[in-house]
Amino acid sequence: MKVTLTVIKADIGAIGGHICPSQRLLEAVDNYVTEHGAKLVVDSYLSYTGDDIAIVATHTRGANDQAVHRLCWDAFIAGTEVAKSQGLYGAGQDLLKDSFSGNVRGMGPAVAELEFEERPNEPFLFFAADKTDPGAYNFPLYMAFADPMNTPGLMLSPSMAQGFRFVIMDVSDTEGDRVIELQAPEDLYSIATLLRDPERYVVESVWSRSTDEQAAAVSTSRLHNIAGKYTGKDDPVMLVRVQKDFPATGEVLAPYAIGPFVAGAMRGSHQMPLMPVPLNSGISYFDGPPVVSCAAFAMHKGKMTEPVDAFAHPFWDTVRDNVSKKAIDMRRQGFFGAAMLPMSELEYTGIVEKLETLDRRFAVRATSRPSDALRRAGS
Ligand code: F6R
Ligand code: MG
Ligand code: MG
């Protein structure tokens, strides 16, 4: 049976600023999908991570299906009404267009979709991150699909040993989807060269080279590319199929133990470590730290089991403690150097405007040229 997994997520309002959505908002979205999606989707699951809510839907209508995308868009509209009625902050924030046109790509909500022939047993992982951007997944995907130091399956499994294809998008291009395909392991250094710059080059998908099946799909939207101005960080979602010809669940989860520094947190303008958190967690410290959750599922004929909370296991408590320490350490240096993102990534315009004003006040001091100093020294 050919199944499509669609995840669409949006921030449509939160309690206490940007912490997490309200219970009533979640109920409104869930009820809408249940009531109006009965004929469209086989199954659905709703969760939140920070202030973002995500609808995971299974169906047989293929990727970019207008009716499924419209269902999610309309569910977010219904949620936005509740958000407004409760005075939630940023109600409807990620719904950047006034009316639905075809599919939600380019309209604000993030989308990731996988379409595949369902295996007799079909395990997959659904990741959702808040207070960061899609490049946050570059690191764990590289480790899981290209690095035998992390993924012994690349050595031990004959099919995985044939490697994986990375489709990487240049998200700075606002005209269209500018992508490159690179093969691991032959193109490893090229892949690394791009992925080291996660604000510009983002893994969009990963494919098995032995079966040509898609293993991973990442939402690559950049909200400021759509809106032309800051409207919140992009808070990416990702779907990853696991086991057999794909990395094992543990190989996909392992890189998150590092707690790598990613772009985001306060005002979307800082470097902070990524914390793996349980499902339905809010955020707190310094509007962060950036968080990522993971729901593991099994699926049969499009019906999902209950989610298993992959980062709720006690192992991750130590990781969370380490990430907290890294976050506090980084915050000790305030605005200085690596703590903040480079100019091009600052999500508010204040610094740029201030620099323009200051620039006009700079003057070249007439006597301070090196040649003057040399002359004075008699050389
Ligand atoms: C980061 C984020 C928050 C806000 C901050 C200020 O992605 O959403 O850190 O940037 O709380 O929010 P506003 O500008 O809405 O007052
Ligand atoms: Mg937000
Ligand atoms: Mg968010």
Image (cartoon, rainbow, N blue to C red):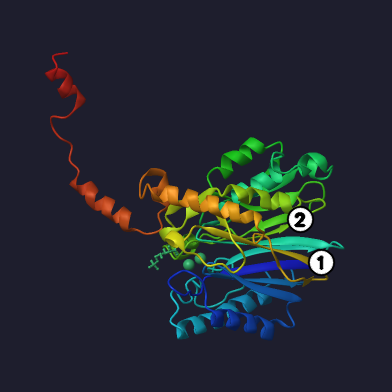
Q: Which mark is residue 242?
A: 2
Residue occupying the far right of the picture: 120
Could you say whether the residue bearing mark 1 is in a helix, strand or loop? Answer: strand
Q: Is residue 93 above or below residue 241?
A: below
Relative to 356, 14 lies left or right = right
Query: Which circle, 2 or 1, is nearer the viewer?
Result: 2
Residue at 63% from the left image edge and 35% from the top image edge: 189
Residue 200 seen: no
**In the displayed structure, does residue 255 sit left or right of residue 160?**
left
Q: Residues within 10 Å of mark 2 (few under 14, many from 20)?
A: many
Relative to residue 149, is residue 271 drawn left or right?
left
- Does the Cβ of the disc 2 residue fall within 8 Å of ligand 3? no
Q: Which residue is mark 1?
A: 2
Q: CA distance from mark 2 to mark 1?
A: 17 Å
Answer yes or no: is residue 122 visible.
yes
Q: What kind of residue is marked 1?
A: Lys
